[in-house]
Image (cartoon, rainbow, N blue to C red):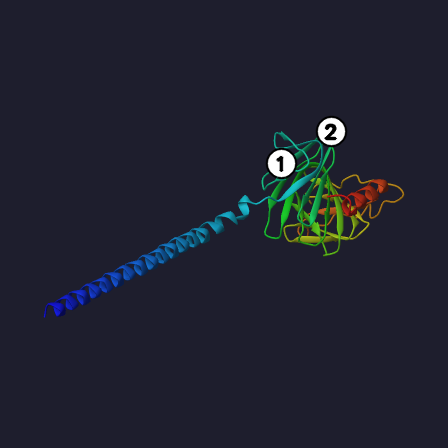
Amino acid sequence: MSRLCVDRLTVTRKVDCLTVTRKVDRLTVTRKVDRLRVVSRITATLLSFALLITPVWATPSSSSLGIVVYADRAQVGAARASVGTTIFSGDRLSTDPSGSVQVRAGAARLVLSNASSATFSQEDAGPAATLAFGSATFSTANSNAFALHVASAVIRPNTNRPTIGQVTVLNPKELIVKSTRGSLTIAVEDDVREIPEGAAYRILLDPNAADPQGPRGAGTKGYGRPPVKAAKSKFIWYAVAITGGVGVFALLEVFESPDRP
């Protein structure tokens, strides 16, 4: 009888130990599950935060338009321009009377000659600049690569072929546009015309102005034509002779040489 009681006590203790062990195991499993839940919640929170801030990083207003690849006595705003300077929308580039600057903007390049000033901007089609005074030469790889504004006129490539154009501002209402490679379009509101490769035109933005005294003599094309009526045109133009062939070949070398950045 006594022995039986001892056996029951032994069995009871073993059962109690087993029960305690099972409870400890359950607690351990529960803690592991809790850890996994905590980690999952932290991961989900971080992913949500990343998705929230990604559109802010991608906004066009914070992205650059181009970078300076050559600068000699040139400025970005009031600061001196140097190779590697980043150009943003709204930045104004200017050059001293003996300076120049070249900017690479996507599939385009812009060179400002001496005593020139232009302000960069972002358009739906791509980067653009407004030439205030002086002379600018641009090179493009496609028709949407770049647009140059002068007052109410917009000059851009006409095709997706490599194009080089040059624009010189004579005064706020008058400019010279020439294409040395490919063709260009010049548009003033709904009046759009093509400037073929190898041609140059003197543009008068005020159709009501008097007939400008264009160049005379050999090489001059179209001089003496009557101005187009203002009711049909937003500007009038006169073909002029292209000069400065050496400069054209130098620009081709600048834009096309694989050794340059």
Give me the disc on residue 122. Answer: none
In the rendered image of this protein, does residue 152 appear above or below residue 142? above
Q: Is residue 37 left or right of residue 136?
A: left
Is residue 156 or residue 32 the one in the foreground? 32
Residue 216: % across, % down:
85, 40
Q: Residue at x 21, y 66 (%)?
A: 15
Mark 2 lies on residue: 97
Residue 260: % across, % down:
76, 43
- Which amino acid, mark 2? Pro
Q: Quadrant of residue 92?
A: top right
Tell me if mark 2 has few (under 14), some (14-19) or many (20+) residues whose alpha carbon lies within 10 angstroms of its own.
few
Residue 54: % across, % down:
49, 51
Is residue 251 or residue 133 the one in the foreground? 251
Q: Residue at x 13, y 68 (%)?
A: 3
Tell me if mark 1 has few (under 14), some (14-19) or many (20+) residues whose alpha carbon lies within 10 angstroms of its own.
many
In the rendered image of this protein, does residue 109 appear above or below residue 77? below
Q: Is residue 108 left or right of residue 45?
A: right
Q: Is residue 17 left or right of residue 70?
A: left
Residue 35: % across, % down:
35, 55
Mark 1 lies on residue: 92
Q: Visible in this render: residue 63? A: yes
* SS category of the residue bearing label 1: strand
Q: Residue at x 64, y 37 (%)?
A: 85
Label 2 to label 1, Cα distance in Å? 16 Å
Residue pushed farthest right? Answer: 218
